[in-house]
Amino acid sequence: MSGWWLPKSWDVSACWPAAARDGADAAGFAARLAVPVEPSVSILPEELTHSDAVATHLASPAITAFLAQVCDGSPYLRGLCLRDPSRLAALLRDGPEMAVGGARAALETAMIAAADFSSVSRALRVFKCDVALATALADIGGLWSLEAVTGTLSDAADTAIAAALEFIFAKAHSDGRWLGDAGADGYAATSGMIVLGMGKYGARELNYSSDVDLIVFFDREKAQVRDGLDAQQFFVRVVRDLTKLIQEQTSDGYVFRVDLRLRPDPGSTQVAISSTAALIYYETYGQNWERAAFIKARPVAGDFSSADALLNELEAYVWRKYFDFAAVSDVHAMKRQINTFKGFRKIVVRGHDIK
């Protein structure tokens, strides 16, 4: 049963270089550095030079200069390197692909043993730190493409959210609040809870500082809550617990910031909305910007069959067959608002951000 709660989408190996996919990177991190590394005037932190595990790799001038420049240029990455030098050594020895796989395996083990929210919170943050370090070094060192970097970060978010959600449902089941049984894919997989990733997250384009945009719906017909407990109350609490596990700042940091504001009428609705109410809203009041937002929507956790059914229902709303003059005018107005707010009518500096 190990890892049964993990999303099946976790596989960014197709984005990695062929040599890495074929296991031809046994020579180690130094042999694969794809960017020129100049001798550095920066000095490695003493904690690394005194680490027996890391010292083996410092025989390579390229690795020494590379790590010195990374630690000198990024306090965050410096902290990750110092947090566990033995894991840094394993990353340098085995490569970032195996490091990411090892982080996933460690999370699986930690989640199986986790008994409370505190231990889950720590396991998720350790996982994120390990993935972030491997991804950043592979990125800076030129080992991975842009697609591999954003794909790895997006898949890490999928895994963290799925793991946190499954723990919340398992806890609710043990407390008697959730009556559904755990099937082959866990409690959440048949819960009727739909967690959609939106924006850059939905498109698997997360960068290092991205938050995760989520919309959460639930199917009342699948809700198996105890008598006397309102289904919406239950799912709202699940979303709040999920948000806390993912974005709360602790001594171990946070996993991802969570943004739930893309849901229908966020100023007056709960953080979890029934799928029936959602369909009524989008068919009656849905706006063009919401239609555009759903182009990148994808299920990231929870009940994927319910999510697919809902997205199929929304397909006619998102991809309208015909546009009347009012709709076309609304699209032009949305573009004018973007230009007015961000001033994108002309390129003003090199590297101008067109988002």
Image (cartoon, grey):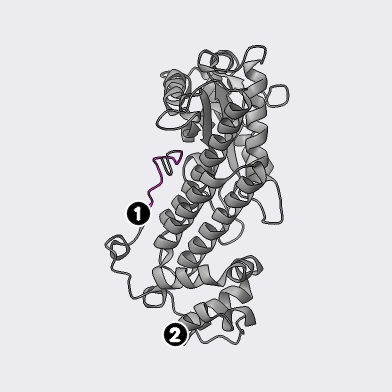
The tag earlier along the polypeptide, 2 or 1, is 1
Q: Residue, x 68% and y 23% (percent of image)?
A: 270
Quarter of the view holding residue 45: bottom right
Q: Is residue 315 above or below residue 28?
A: above
Residue bearing the label numbered 2: 60
* Residue stretch in magenta: 5-15
Q: Helix or strand or loop: what does disc 1 sit on? A: helix
Quarter of the view holding residue 185: top left
Q: Is residue 70 above or below residue 225?
A: below
Q: The residue under label 2 is which amino acid type?
A: Ser
Is residue 85 part of the magenta span, yes or no? no
- Relative image position of residue 321 (x, y in whole percent): 41, 19
Q: Is residue 55 above or below residue 256?
A: below
Q: Residues within 10 Å of mark 1 (few under 14, many from 20)?
A: some
Q: CA distance from mark 2 to mark 1?
A: 27 Å
Q: Residue, x 59% and y 38% (percent of image)?
A: 213
Residue bearing the label numbered 1: 13
Question: Is residue 34 in view?
Answer: no
Q: Which mark is residue 226?
A: none
Is residue 8 part of the magenta span, yes or no? yes
- Relative image position of residue 265 (x, y in whole percent): 67, 23
Q: Helix or strand or loop: what does disc 2 sit on? A: loop
Q: The residue under label 1 is which amino acid type?
A: Ser
- 137 or 173: nearer the eye? 173
- Relative image position of residue 152 (x, y in whole percent): 46, 53
